[in-house]
Amino acid sequence: MANRIDWIQQELSSLKEAGLYNRIRTLSSPQGAWLVVDGKRVLNFCSNNYLGLANHPRLIKAAQEIVTRYGVGPAAVRTIAGTMDLHLELERRMAAFKGVEAAITFQSGFTANLATIPALVGKEDVIFSDRLNHASIIDGCRLSGAKIIAYEHNDPASLEEQIKANLSQFRRALVVTDGVFSMDGDIAPLPDIYEVAKKYDILLMVDDAHGEGVLGHGGRGIVDHFGLHGKVDGEVGTMSKTFGVVGGVGPGTWSSSSGCASADAPSCSRRP
């Protein structure tokens, strides 16, 4: 009699035959331009360590000092006994950096989308989502239970067409888009998307994971790049790309209508 889990091996074999089996590379060196991968020194073209911060001496020294002071983890969820003053300081600094009222951090950028989108919309609502949005946005939309309606990639006219045809059927609506699309590197036409969302009084959220450190003054991202402070309702971001560490941030946090909300915030509207 066949073992009840024999099908797993058959599925793995099928993936290998189709060239779809994911063979994970193993790094034996710090993240950087040159890596040791599976014992070989290779030039790295595929990480998101845009500014080289993952192995920066100042970050290594700061991390060592924090581990000595706080240990290696909180050992509890944040809602029970896992929120440290360190978390709150990070969130204050991120809010000031982004020029928004508040920020909340997550374990990853993926979980930031999974947590944020279902908090904004539910089964009675609709999400208008760019057709090429990241998988974390798609999963967050599915988790929310809201109706998902895709509009054509980076096409504000298609977005408006879908809104006109569907908005009246739902309680609330959310427009969500990547800022910089990771596969092709193209940038969302955020000013035009904002105008459509504003016209129909719809919440607008952007995932700026690949825009941080690349766009805007001092790498503040796509909202700063287009001067949309106080207009885009929320951003989701990540610490695991430009910032070179681990974690996510969101919901980018509901922007002040005055632009830079914090008195300690830098001049967000400046350009490099």
Image (tube, rainbow, N blue to C red):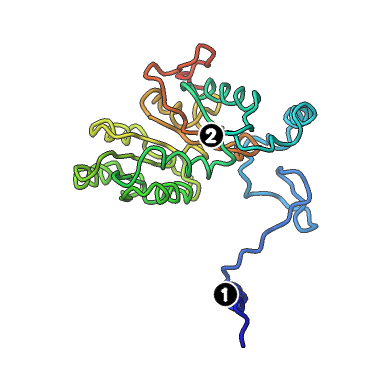
Circle 1 residues within 10 Å: few <14, some 14–19, many ≥20: few
**Residue ID for mark 2:** 249
Q: Give the farthest residue toward the front.
A: 80
The residue closer to the viewer here, 178 or 91, is 91
Residue 120 located left or right of residue 61: left
Label 1 secondary element: helix
Residue 77 located left or right of residue 138: right
Label 2 secondary element: strand
**The residue under label 2 is which amino acid type?**
Val
**The residue under label 1 is which amino acid type?**
Glu
Q: Is residue 179 above or below residue 89?
A: below
Q: Quadrant of residue 48?
A: top right
Q: Which mark is residue 258?
A: none
For the N terminus, the image quarter is: bottom right
Image coordinates for residue 109, horizontal then vertical, percent: 54, 41
Residue 17 located left or right of residue 156: right
Circle 2 residues within 10 Å: few <14, some 14–19, many ≥20: many
Image coordinates for residue 9, horizontal then vertical, percent: 62, 76
Image coordinates for residue 104, horizontal then vertical, percent: 53, 30
Q: Residue at x 42, y 41 (%)?
A: 117
* Label 1 vs 2, first from the N-terminus: 1
Q: Which mark is residue 11?
A: 1
Q: Quadrant of residue 244?
A: top right
How many marks overall? 2
Q: Residue at x 26, y 46 (%)?
A: 158
Q: Is residue 248 above or below residue 265?
A: below
Q: Is residue 60 above or below residue 151?
A: above
Image coordinates for residue 80, horizontal then vertical, percent: 60, 33
Residue 128 located left or right of residue 118: left
